[in-house]
Image (cartoon, rainbow, N blue to C red):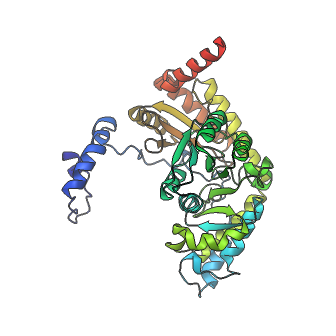
Amino acid sequence: MEVIDDMRPHSGAAAAGIHPLLRQRIAREFEPRWRDAWGGRFILHGRVPDAGAVRLDGNDYLAVSGHPDIVRAQVEALRSDGEAVVQSGVFLLEGHPVHRLEREIARWMGHEDGVLCQSGYAANLGLLQIIADAQTPVYIDALAHMSLWEGARAASAPVHVFRHNDPAHLRRLLAAHGPGVIAVDSLYSTTGSLCPVEAIVAAAEAHGCMTVVDESHSLGTHGEQGAGICHALGLSSRVDFITVSLAKAFAGRGGFFTMPAPMRYYTLISAFPNIFSSSLLSHEVAGLAATLKVLKAADEERRRLHANTRRLRASLAALGYPIQHGTEQIIALESGSEASAMRLRDELECRDVVGSIFCAPATSRNRAMVRLTLNAALTEAELEHVEHAAKEVAAVVEPWKWPIARRMASTRAGTDRT
C-alpha cells in the first residue's frame, strides 16, 4: 500500500486511517493508474501557470467574469439583502427573485418556466429523476454528459446508448424498446461537436418520446441573443426540456432546466436536488440576473468567439492535429493514453499554453485528451502564441500518429471505397 501512504496529506496533523475494505478498492481501481500511467503524479495537475500564459482551460466563453454590471449587482445584493433566509428552494414563495429569474431565463430560451438548481449536474440529475422511472427507457448519446447518465440511474430507468450523433442507430433502438426519454447535448463538452438536434427531435416525435437537450456549452454562445441552439433552429417548442449549467457562458454557479408551467409544483416536491439542497444565495441570483442582460447584448463577443474558433481550428488542423470530429469553441486534442495526454499537456505548458486533461471517467479509457476551450477575449498576440506553440509541440508529439488520427484515416478510406 505504498502509494496510498505516499498520498496522505502533509498537514502536520495525523492523517485519518483508511478502512481495509476501502484500501482494497483504492489498490484495485486507482493505484495502477497512479503508479503506471501517471508516474506518481496527479494527472489533472500540471505546473502553476506563468503570469503571461494563455489560459485555454476555462469555460467563460464570452469573458464576462468581472464585468462591472455583474459585480455591481452582486455587491448591491450583499449590502442590501439583510433579511435573506438560507433554505431549500422549495420554500421560496411566489415573487421571490429566484422565481423571477427562472421565468426570465426560460422565456429567453423559448419555454414557459424553469427551475434554478445548484449546478448543471444537479439540474440533469433532478430532471431525469422526475421524468423517467423503471418503466421508462432512457436513450442517451454515447458522449452525453455524465450527469444525464446519473439522472437515468437515479430514476432506475433502463438505459440504451446510441452511437454518438447517429440518429439512425437511435431509431433502431427506439423501434426495439419503445417510447421513453432521449437525452443529448447540443454541443458536446469533450469534442466540440454539434448534435443533429433536428434529426433527434424528429426521431423522438416519430416514436412518442420526450427529449432532453443539455445546452450547457451553447447557451449564451449560440443563437440570437445567445438563446441557444434549440432556439436558433426553431426547435424550442418541440424540445420538451432544455438543461444548462450556469458555470459556462454565465461564468457563475448554478444550473437550470426548463419545464412546462403546470409542472412547477410537481417538480418542487419531487426533484431531490431541489428538496434536499439550499437555494442559491441572493448575491449569486443577482449576479446571474445581471449576467443574463450582459449575455443578451453580447453579439460582438459571440462574433469574436466564433472567429477565434474558426481561426484556431484551421491552424491546428493544418499542423496535423486530428480535430475534425468537432467544430465549435471546445477543441479536443485526443492523444490516446493517459501518459501521452500528460506529455502533451506538459509540452504545451512549457510553452505557456494551458489546457485541461480529460480522461476516464470523463472520457472512455485510452481516449484521454487535452481540451482547449476558447473565449472571446483572446488577442491577436495570444492566438499567434498558441499557433506557434502548437507547431513546436506537433514536431514533438506527432499528432498525425495518434490513435484517433489512424481511426479517421481508416474511416475516410472506407468511405472512399464505397
Residue 379 or 409: which is nearer the viewer?
409
Residue at the image position 65 percent from the left and 69 percent from the top: 287
Number of labels in the image equals 0
**Residue 331 pos. (x, y %):** 59, 38
Residue at the image position 67 percent from the left and 51 percent from the top: 211
Q: Is residue 273 left or right of residue 60?
A: left
Residue 286 in view (yes/no): no
**Residue 117 pos. (x, y %):** 58, 66
**Residue 213 pos. (x, y %):** 65, 51
As displayed, is residue 303 above or below residue 344?
Answer: below
The quarter in which the C terminus is drawn is top right
Q: Is residue 354 left or right of residue 326?
A: left
As displayed, is residue 385 above or below residue 107?
Answer: above
**Residue 159 pos. (x, y %):** 52, 47
Residue 149 or 285: which is nearer the viewer?
149
Residue at the image position 72 percent from the left and 74 percent from the top: 100
Residue 374 in view (yes/no): yes
Q: Which residue is the extreme one toward the top?
A: 417
Q: Which residue is the extreme one toward the bottom?
A: 83
